[in-house]
Amino acid sequence: MRTRPATLGDLADLRRLHALLQTHHAAADPHWFKSPTDGETGPNTFAELMARRDNHFILAEAGEPPRPIGYAWVEVVDQAETPLRRPHRSAYLHHLIVEPAARRGGAGGALMAAFRDVGARAGADRLILNVWEFNAAARNFFRAQGFEPLQTRLWAPLAAADGLIS
């Protein structure tokens, strides 16, 4: 098991792995998430994101020859001072996915270590990620990695059944 920065030569693997992530989300909440066939990541999306200095894509590889089995997308985010908050720099984990057959083999932990390393090298004062409530396995994994809730985001649908919208 090893991790390394992704390159433009890895775009096909990033798209393949991202399709696994998107499929999982779309199956859990099809009203919010598109399936990969509904809203497939365009061929240039990852290349455009990789071109930004604040984005870091990390691949986890296993086997001989090494084959990508997961990836993490980390963005370094600077928040300016406001009247209510102090300025800060964080490392934000947008995506983390490991192929189902490779889970529980250390790839997720290796990607999290790479996430921490990106944050440390960037001088971040915190690591931040979001996890969907429907994804109990991810919530448990991130808690085992030392993450705890920072904020709770609530929602409610506006539906005709509620008499709110006609």
Image (tube, rainbow, N blue to C red):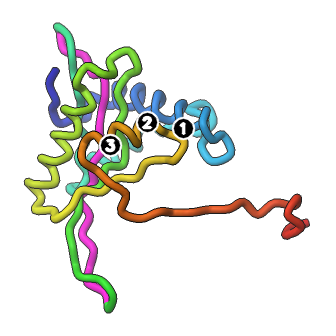
Query: Which of label 2 and label 1 is nearer to you?
Result: 1
According to the picture, the residue beneath numbered tag 2 turns out to be 43
- Residue type at numbered disc 2: Pro
Decide: is 33 above or below 55: above
The magenta region covers 65-82
Would you say 106 lies left or right of 44 here?
left
Against 119, residue 18 (above or below) is above
Residue that carries the numbered disc 3 in the rendered image: 142
Using the rendered view, name the quadrant where residue 141 is placed. top left
Question: In the image, residue 97 lies at what x, y percent?
Answer: 37, 32
Between 79 and 106, the one lying in front of the other is: 106
Q: Residues within 10 Å of mark 1 (few under 14, many from 20)?
A: some
For label 3, the crowd category at 10 Å Cα-Cα, with few meaning under 14, some 14 to 19 and many 20 or more, is: some
Q: Are marks 2 and 1 in contact (CB under 8 Å)?
A: no
Which secondary structure, mark 3?
Answer: helix
Image coordinates for residue 40, horizontal then vertical, percent: 54, 36
Q: Disc 3 or 2, which lies upstream in sequence?
A: 2
Q: Nearer the viewer, mark 3 or mark 2?
A: 3
Q: Which of 79 and 65 is in front in this view?
A: 79
Q: Mark 1 points at which residue?
A: 25
Question: Residue at (15%, 32%) from the top-left corner?
Answer: 4
Magenta: predominant secondary structure element? strand
Q: Distance between the residues labelled 3 and 1?
A: 17 Å
Residue 66 lies in the magenta-colored region: yes
Quarter of the image with the C terminus in it: bottom right
One can see residue 34 in this view: yes
Q: How far apart are marks 2 and 1 (CA)?
A: 20 Å
Q: In this view, does 122 lie to the left or right of 59?
A: left
Front disc: 3 or 1: 3
